[in-house]
Image: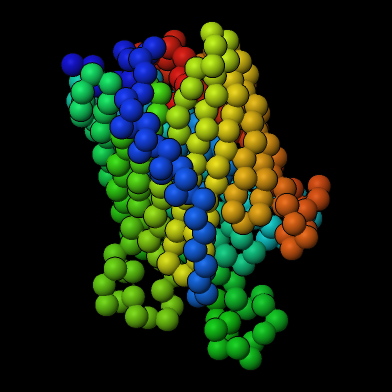
Amino acid sequence: MNLLRSSFYNRQLPHDALKISLIAVLCLCYTFKSSAQSTIPFSYSQYMNNLTPINSAYAMVDQAGSITGAVRKQFTGIEGAPSTYLVNANIPLPGLGAATGFIVQSDQIAIEKQIEANFFFAKSIQLDDRNFLAVSANAGISSYKANYLLIDNNNDPLFNANVNETRLNAGIGMLLYSDTYYIGFSMPQLTFRSLGTASVQGDNYFRNHYYLAGAYLAELSDDFKFKPSGLAVYTKGTPITANITGIIYMKDLLGFGAGYTTNSQASFLLDVNVGNLHIGYSYQVGTNGSNLSGYNNAIHEIMVGFRFGEGSSTPKDL
């Protein structure tokens, strides 16, 4: 039995699944605010075309193997400006109806830096002739560093020592999908230290991350498709951040779109597909005076992906 989406082209999304997807996307607009010590939630603008680093169950959406790299930089000329580096690979296991791979990512904001490396395994089951449910598990290691001594406030006991900690990491993901939509929930950074009694420690720098993501592919005509997508991320002690993005594709070769994130950031995206090579670029700027919008404060993101193996000749939409 084929558990992969390529055998279900040109079929419509069931009414119930569409309603669930729309409700989920609307929920992504909600923003929750609280105050506490923050950690770094991993994020990037082009998640809709490479969700695996956030939810490894997404590896089941495509029957081809792939390797993807991304760089996200804020060019302010200031040391410690936000930057992200990412490499992930998906390797299909058709005989098992499964996939495996790895994810390596690095996020840095000011004095904080977090590096994470994970291996994952994902498996899909067929719910009916159109819909699938994929589940995944990942395990690896996380490293967190914070150079608090760089802050000119040594009289504050919260900043009188640097932090350098490494912990084992585990995560899970679930994804409901067909050839025209996906909606999923994941916890890729599920650290047990933040689950039990150890969480009462004031220096708990590893916290669970919760992601909700969804996308829908609408065929407008033979040449044009539209893909709206949404992502929300929450970490205890930080506000929920939500993003809504829409991309229009022409002949599966060129895509352009825009998005908005609830932390007052707007993004503009460009996608180019040449054979098995995918190149994506996004330009993100602030939308109000408090985040100093302007060219020098803009965030540039480049993503390059290559598909290989059986099924790589079939265009990948989701």
Q: Residue at x 32, y 37 (%)?
A: 175
Q: Residue at x 31, y 13 (%)?
A: 7
| Residue farthest to the bottom, as pictured | 155
> Relative to 195, does residue 160 appear above or below in the rendering?
below
> Relative to 280, does residue 284 appear above or below in the rendering?
below
| Residue farthest to the right, as pictured | 295
> Relative to 155, does residue 293 appear above or below in the rendering?
above
In front of the other: 210 or 15? 15
Q: Viewed as shown, does residue 169 lie left or right of 108?
A: left
Residue 53 lies, in percent from the top left, at: 43, 42
Residue 271 lies, in percent from the top left, at: 62, 25
> From the image, which quarter does the N terminus lie in?
top left
Q: How is the image coloured?
A: rainbow
Query: How many circles with numbers are drawn on the protein?
Result: 0
Q: Is residue 126 visible?
A: yes
Q: Residue at x 55, y 69 (%)?
A: 146
> From the image, which quarter does the C terminus lie in?
top left
Q: Residue at x 81, y 47 (%)?
A: 295
In front of the other: 219 or 48? 219
Residue 137 lies, in percent from the top left, at: 27, 45
